[in-house]
Amino acid sequence: MQTDTMLTVQDLNVYYGAIHALKGISFELKKGEIVALIGANGAGKSTTLSTISGLIRPRQGSIIFEGKDITMAPSEQIVRLGIVQSPEGRRIFATLTVMENLEMGAYTRSNKAEIQDGLAEVFKRFPRLDERRKQLGGTLSGGEQQMLAIARAMMARPALLLLDEPSMGLSPILVEQIFDIIHDINEDGTSILLVEQNAQMALSISDRAYVLETGRIVMSGDAQEMLHDPSIVEAYLGGGH
Amino acid sequence: MTPNGTPNSKDTLFIQSLRKGWLGKVFLILIGLAALWKLGVSLADNPVLFLQQVINGLQLGFVYALIALGYTMVYGIVRLINFAHGDVFMVGAFVGFYTIARFQFHTWPERLFPGLPQWLVLGVGTVTVVLISMAICALLAFTIERVAYKPLRNAPRISALITAIGVSFFLEYFGALQFVFTPNFVTFERPFSVQNWQINNLGIQALPSGQSPADNSIIISNIALIIVLASILLLLLLQFIVQGTRVGKAMRAVAYDKQTARLMGINVDGIISITFAIGAALAGAAGILYATAFPQVYFVMGIIPGLKAFVAAVLGGIGSIPGAVVGALIMGQAEVLSAAYISTPMRDAVAFSILVIVLLVRPTGIFGEPEREKA
């Protein structure tokens, strides 16, 4: 469908001290796509997202977003450019209310009316959060926290949403719900880079996917084809989450 | 020593009870009961004197609260005990001294608009002096944070702590230089004169200076009133900033989880700087209020009030803003009451005994929560 490339990651090398965490990763994401990064624990999926968000500096390689080199840009600027991450483990501000968490999501935006529109939109998508807007983030259930984490990221009005393990620790019914919402968000025009251990679920809503193994991309392709590729099914989907 | 805490059969009962902390707790409870009994007797004996002490303690407690907030806010956001904070308080007092004694800044409205009523001149003038001191302290703390603490953000915590002690000595002995502040005790010139009122069974009467009060009356000075009111005003302002503004919410978000705050596009370093600046501004105001109540400034005047405010912050639960205020008010009372009913030199010992007791009994303080495990 769309052909213009939104994000290009080129030969990314990241170290944690002496540990070579990403060993020359390259991939791209086109506007409007959902791209999944799948792989086992410790393969480097979260590291990739952290590097794109500017929390970790790569030793080598480049990240180009909509024609701009953001490899060394500070996190705030990356958010302002439109790449927003919903981190692994949800990382809700437990001591802030649901409303305040959402306001923090909109921190880079200053237009009050637009923020109000964003809130209305988010509450329409997540009516549960509307009911709990005055509650402290730490008192929400796991599923509600995941919704809040996505909603908080949406408050920054991202062009590209980075989702790190949105299914973590959730019951199968909730996982289903969350993935429906992710699909809807994408339909409404937000590109998504999805990191998941639950490969089956991730492939089922993605356009394309990359498989990571110990810091390298070992396979890539069309998500639907991968979902039905026996070798992948055996290696990555065998657990049958 | 048995690592898992099960009593070793060879230990005597005494050692066993020590290990379980029983003896210590009994000892503390006895001390507490003795103190309460002493206070109860004193209250029954002379309620007017007791009430007078409580009022004095309130005045001191609010000054401690303003200082303690800086400790607690900075700890909450960067987990650093900023030992230079007491010296920022000292700088605040000296800035007040210079703007009043040297530059007569407290009377600027009169010089600009002659003929204004005196109360208005001094009111606006004093507020100006306090604001100048707050601004200079905020700028100072901003600079200290950028120069001394920020480069150590990822260093072990002990490095930053030692640096804080170094900054503290630097401020003290740099201030002691003849061309900076002075190595001498200086009398702080109050921006307004003291007015006492006596309250007794005849009602409230103004007490002309030099006249001794009637028996059985409580004395309240305009200074005590100003300290209490100004502190409450500043506390409310802080509460508004922290709870109601975008920056305040970002401060709480950064205190909770810096990395996620960064993912929200929050400029974490900027928010940390603002936190230092706000804490220092409160200490600057406290410096002037303290010097107005005890009119003497000296380059190491910040050490003892600073340490006591630190104890107050620990007592209330370091990192907790309401905790700092409650802890400081308790410290104020403890100090004044022990000076009145035990002995004056004992008051510092009592203050620091409180620190020891808090660390033994409830290390997280009154409002504190156990350190959170970060995901």
Image: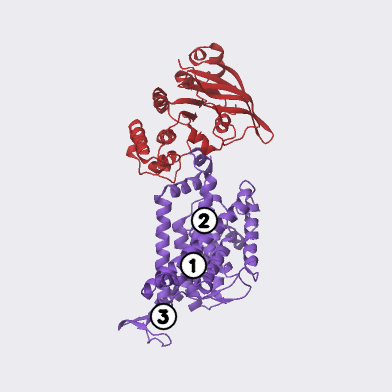
Chain colours: A red, B purple
Q: Is residue B22 visible?
A: yes
Total numbered labels placed on residues in the image: 3
**Of the image marks 1 and 2, the number of the one nearer the N terminus:** 2
**Of the image marks 2 and 3, the number of the one nearer the N terminus:** 3
Q: CA distance from mark 2 to mark 3?
A: 39 Å
Question: The residue marked by circle 2 belongs to what chain?
Answer: B
Q: Residue furthest left?
A: B202
Q: Which residue is mark 2?
A: B277
Task: Identify which amino acid the numbered label 3 is placed on.
Answer: Leu
| SS for dot 3 | helix
Q: Residue furthest right?
A: A18
Q: CA distance from mark 1 to mark 2?
A: 25 Å
Residue at (56% x, 66% y) in the render:
B91
Vertical arrangement, residue B100 with respect to residue A153, above or below: below
Q: Nearer the viewer, residue B131 or B93?
A: B131
Instruction: Provide residue B215's location: percent of width, then percent of height.
Output: 38, 87
Task: Identify which amino acid the numbered label 2 is placed on.
Answer: Ala
**Of the image marks 1 and 3, the number of the one nearer the N terminus:** 3
Q: Quadrant of the N terminus of chain A?
A: top left
- Other residues around mark 2 within 10 Å, as few (<14) / some (14–19) / many (≥20): many
Task: Identify which amino acid the numbered label 1 is placed on.
Answer: Met
Q: Which residue is mark 1?
A: B331
Q: Which residue is mark 3?
A: B49
